[in-house]
Image: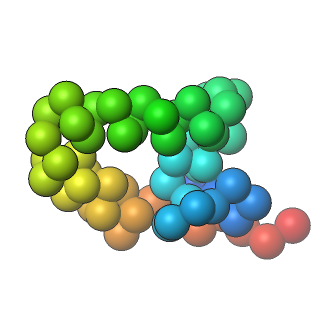
Amino acid sequence: MRKLYLSRENSKIFGVCGGIGQTYDIDPTLVRLMVVFLCFATGILPLLFTYIIAWAIVPKEPKP
């Protein structure tokens, strides 16, 4: 089982979407597009709070 980390390579803002993409072998751009779509579909604040909480909880990727 792979552990979720904040991405160092695919980081645009905090690296949450890049880390999810790396963990589940999905293109990080698709993850970002899904986040933007969900942000508008559910209202901006719920997903924004979830993203910030994920950034605070998920550890940074260890250096190689």
Image position of 13 with respect to 1: above or below: below
Is there any visible trace of residue 59 in the rendered image?
no
Q: In the image, 14: left or right of 56?
A: right
Is residue 64 in sight in this rendering? yes
State which quarter of the image contains the C terminus. bottom right
Relative horizontal placement of residue 52, taking residue 16 as reference (left or right): left
Q: Residue at x 40, y 64 (%)?
A: 55
Q: Is residue 53 left or right of residue 14?
A: left
**In front: 29, or 21?**
29
Quarter of the picture containing the N terminus is top right
Q: Percent from the top left, x then y, of residue 27? A: 67, 32
Percent coordinates x, y for residue 63 in the rendering: 79, 71
Residue at point 14% right, 33% down? Answer: 42
How is the model colour-coded?
Answer: rainbow
Expressed as whole percent of the image width and height from the top left, the position of residue 18 reads 61, 49
Choose top left, top right, bottom left or bottom right for residue 62: bottom right
For the residue pair 19 and 57, the one nearer the viewer reads as: 19
Query: Image point 57% across, 30% down: which residue?
Result: 30
**Number of numbered tags placed on the structure image:** 0
Residue 59, how many percent across, how many down?
A: 52, 65
> Residue at position x 48%, y 34% from top?
33
51 displayed left or right of 62: left
Q: Residue furthest right?
A: 64
Q: Is residue 35 above or below residue 57?
A: above
